Image (cartoon, helix red, strand yellow):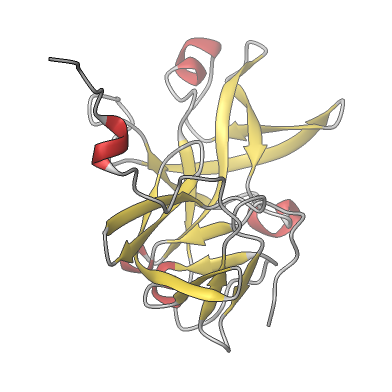
Amino acid sequence: MSTSSTPTPKVAPEHRSQLRVGRLTKAHGLKGALKIELYTDEPEKRFVPGATFTLQVPEESPWHGKPLTLAELRWYNGTPVGFFVDVDDRSQAETLARAILWIDVDTELSPDEPDAWYDHQLVGLTVVRDGKPVGTVSRVDHFPAQDLLVVATDSGEVMVPFVAAIVPAVDIVAKTVTVTPPGGLFEALNDDEEAPVHAD
């Protein structure tokens, strides 16, 4: 099973049994609504009234450790806007800006969405570049902007941005991840070449 190179790949951490589906970008209006950046191709399935999300926020956030329940999803000029339970005004909404939304999923199943995988499906896969193995996926690191594949190589770990331009294909059946990284990502510079030469 190969993936399309068009969408940005998404990953769901196995240990959390969750899938990342969106990010709250900023408050919208005065009634507590927030604009949503979608990380799912099925918002009509993931963002239904009553859907409860786990929030990825800093520890100092008042929302840390608290769930967030969707009351309604509306569209304004093609942009999804969420209204949430107990978020009643703009000041409350602003405290949620930049929060990442996760939903509970069954890790025994593959994600319904194309180009989406759980961590346990990726860890251990052979990373292939130009038809040759260059390492093995040791873990996946999750950040708000993107995910990173941490690849174990003979010379150490390499952090590979998990975006379609650099990781065009994941083949779970063949147990391979194909990468097309920019020059230098997997090549360590020679220390002798880096060191300036000084004349005596």
Vertical placement of 34 versus 117: above or below?
Answer: above
Image check: 98 left or right of 191? Answer: right
Percent coordinates x, y for residue 58 in the rendering? 29, 30
Quarter of the figure with residue 180: bottom right
Q: Quadrant of the C terminus?
A: top left
Between 162 and 128, the one lying in front of the other is 128
| Count of numbered circles in the view | 0
Residue 42 position, x and y percent, is 73, 57
Q: Quadrant of the N terminus?
A: bottom right
Q: Name the residue at the front extreme.
A: 200
Counting from the top left corner in percent of width and height, residue 50 is at 57, 51
Q: Residue at x 26, y 23 (%)?
A: 196
Q: Nearer the viewer, residue 145 or 109?
A: 145
Front residue (pair 36, 126): 126
Q: Measuring 70% from the left and 70% from the top, which residue is drawn there?
A: 3
**In-image side of 156 versus 98 (left or right):** left
Q: Residue visible at 53% across and 81% down?
A: 109
Instruction: Relative to 134, say whether 156 is above or below.
Output: above
Between 128 and 25, which is closer to the camera in this rendering?
128
Outermost residue, bottom side: 173
Task: Give the x, y percent position of residue 195.
Answer: 24, 29
106 left or right of 30 in image: left
Residue at 49% from the left image edge and 16% from the top image edge:
94
Left or right: where does residue 114 sit relative to residue 152?
Answer: right
Rendered view: 94 above or below 72:
above
Outermost right residue = 77
